[in-house]
Amino acid sequence: MRHLSAGQLARLVGAGPRERPYYRAFADAVRAAVLDGQIPVRVRMPAERDLARALGVSRTTVTAAYDLLRERGFLESRQGAGSWTALPDPALTPDNPWLAVDGDGLIQLHAAAPPAPSALRAAMTEAVEEIPRYGMGNGYHPLGLPVLRERIAARYTERGVATRPEQILVTTGSQHAIEVVLGALAAPGDAILVESPTYPHAVDSVRRRGARVVSTGVSADGWHEDLVSGAMRQVGARLAYLMPDFQNPTGALMDDATRSAVAAAARRSGTLLVADETWAELALDEVPRTAPMAAFDTGGRVISIGSASKLWWGGLRIGWIRTTAALARRLAAHRASVDIASPVLEQLVVAALFDRLEETRQERRRALRASRATLVAELREHLPEWRFTVPPGGGTLWIRLDSGSAVSLAEAAACHGVRIAPGPWFGLEGTLEGYLRLPFTQPPQVLREGVARLVTARRLGRTGAVRAPDALSPVV
Amino acid sequence: MRHLSAGQLARLVGAGPRERPYYRAFADAVRAAVLDGQIPVRVRMPAERDLARALGVSRTTVTAAYDLLRERGFLESRQGAGSWTALPDPALTPDNPWLAVDGDGLIQLHAAAPPAPSALRAAMTEAVEEIPRYGMGNGYHPLGLPVLRERIAARYTERGVATRPEQILVTTGSQHAIEVVLGALAAPGDAILVESPTYPHAVDSVRRRGARVVSTGVSADGWHEDLVSGAMRQVGARLAYLMPDFQNPTGALMDDATRSAVAAAARRSGTLLVADETWAELALDEVPRTAPMAAFDTGGRVISIGSASKLWWGGLRIGWIRTTAALARRLAAHRASVDIASPVLEQLVVAALFDRLEETRQERRRALRASRATLVAELREHLPEWRFTVPPGGGTLWIRLDSGSAVSLAEAAACHGVRIAPGPWFGLEGTLEGYLRLPFTQPPQVLREGVARLVTARRLGRTGAVRAPDALSPVV
């Protein structure tokens, strides 16, 4: 293998970089030299000690620079053999900066998360103007700010279930709401009923406390009320976690008759019904009007979870729980040992967005409709063997593949620049291998490019090392 | 008992209130009438049905109004006996709106949480200007925004321990950081060493996962290194949670020799050292310069926790973890099932505050010094029997009472308009009854009034029903 001496490298890259921190500027200069071809690939780099001396910096600085180059794929090392230059996996190179999350350069079709609404900045500016009213306080409001709790309660009332602000607990996103409900109400060994397929982070949260996960099937056509009710009764479910409104991932919408029957069954079996209504505001077609699950409640057994993430933006991290005033206080006390309270400014932003509810909702619905139409058209044209029901709302298509494994396809897709969420991520025991969830939350041009990459991935298969699904890109 | 007919009440209060929601406006009107003496106390209110008819509203509306009045203490009810007007506990009436948290009207001396710095609004305005750069993304950054991770890493480097951004995980406050570390690294039955006294929400978090809490003593004079090291070894501690920098509640500062010895002992006993450095930036006197605990680390065994809450504001809910890059990623994957990620805007605000670090830190130090001087002077004048060491930094005094129980005193104090945190809240088994923590994070005039109320409470004792410590006012 060719090698570079410390003196050569110091001259090539220059003792030049003056930006701080030095190790990063130095690593950037090496990266640029490799990309420009000034330093070829597979050239052995000098020992850290020698390079430190040649550059007149500390050994630690060189170590940090080498670490960074290794992390970015421009350096490979092996014990005893030293380090040599390399090129990172092409799939890692960002081709479009605003498609990339945390810089991995893949189109992110594993997440069903829309961009921010155009009113976000105005809502934020308004919220900042309110801050002086809160700044003298200590900033901790475990139940949430009264102004936001009032707006959330009023919206439930408008949607058909009378609600007082005292019944609302503001959370740091809907996942946090799930975590708080389970943390306070589920014990090891409890049976918890979930849908299959379901939202995977909720299952993580159930499993982490040693509760027993039991599932009931759901498809784009909906639920079998008798199976849901039967499962609650037979396993003596402590809690059932359901998504009646444009279920993630299937997009199914539960009708009022089924809601009523499921709520009655929950009462008979002593099950708490946790209704995750994250997508509830996003009907895209003319669907029969449904009331929130809590409207069918008798006896405070329905705990509703809502979120600002789909209607507005995931980057806000604000969700909420609607329950009885007494349980809201109990859950708030529990959260003190989770995250104490939600950020004040974020809550004021969401309150300001509630004041623009209809306008922002229409914008989101228009965008989702256009994206849904594009995704459906692209799939029908380029992947006509795949089967799916177009959901009347929400943000995801649940696709049945004609053949092969969605897990293999996801591995191939990552090699070709698109990250997707295969069926087993939404199942319980590695099932659902023949399914795939595709979101239509991104703009049409991104979806077109994503489908094109999927077609390539399907044709060529894997073209490099398998990239593990990245736990740092949440599946929402 | 006197009673009001539905017609009388309707006339008194008027079908008048036109603000929405009606039930709240109606309840407010009844409250005002009781406070004005137009409706006497202990007058029976009409049945809900009759009142609904008289007002021409639904029965549900009247129920909601009555519920609200009951919650606020203006109505009492007993099955079969109906409902009658009442006056809430005087301690519940807000006398100074900006001292109250969630409207309970007590001076909040149970929390060590300063008000926001004057630069907060400017930092927020700057952050909002950055938002368009992030709005097209999905908003989920489980490790934290690069701009903030860079600033946090640079600050560690400045403070004496070289740190790369890859080693930083941004969390939703320091309690959340504790929760994430314990959630990922502590299993049921693990021995976890904590200080006694210690930060109570950390203990909640340990206990909730069935880990075993073991303690080692600390006082304002500091730690006994041999006892800390011995305890780690003898119980085979999986993890030790320590606050070396102005320990909460004692204010003790660990010197470098002790840091070094404790870190070495942790390595020998295979213990992970979780150093909560929430108060580290807030030395108030000239103290020997100490390096962050991680500077004494060998082998990635020190996990550092930091926070924006004390230096800047608790309402921001931003904290961080410094560890190895590999463990930072593992912890970030774990948090996906806790809260997914921290809010984007809040992170940008904290990044903007880091750009004003020295200026905001000096402001906070000046305020804390003034408040500390006031609290110390007031206590020496009015409660000279109480003993304490004035800490060289942080935000709390740890006080040894001359006699009696701090728990009884806290109960009496709540009756006289001040909420305090008695010693047992910081202990493990109901010990520390003779101690009290008082924060000096609030302005001098609030502390003066707080001490005056304490003096009254000590003289008069309880003057009403015992008010349980309110779990919704976090002890930070």
Image (spheres, coloured by chain):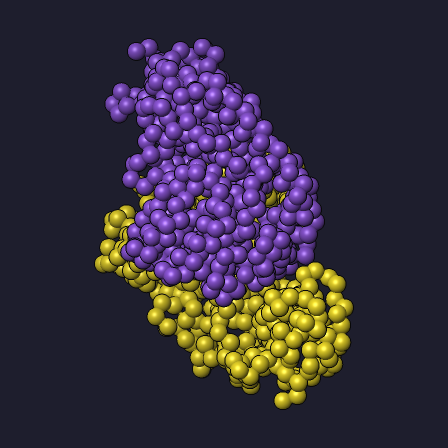
Chain colours: A purple, B yellow
Q: Where residue B216 sits: x, y (%)? A: 33, 63
**Going by the picture, which residue comes out furthest to the bottom?**
B1
- The quarter of the rendered structure image containing the N terminus of chain B is bottom right
Viewer-nearest residue: A139 or A461? A461
Of B101 and A259, nearer the camera is: A259
Can residue A295 be seen in this snapshot? yes
In this rendering, the count of numbered labels is 0
**In the picture, residue B325 is in which quadrant?**
top left
Task: Answer above or below: position of B196 versus A279.
Answer: below
Residue B109, position in %: x, y? 55, 68
Residue at 62%, 74% (x, y): give it.
B48
Q: Nearer the viewer, residue A118 or A363?
A: A363
At x 38%, y 68%, the residue is B427
Position above or below: B379 against A435: below
Q: Residue at x 73, y 80 (%)?
A: B8
Q: Position of residue A364 (x, y in %)?
A: 60, 36
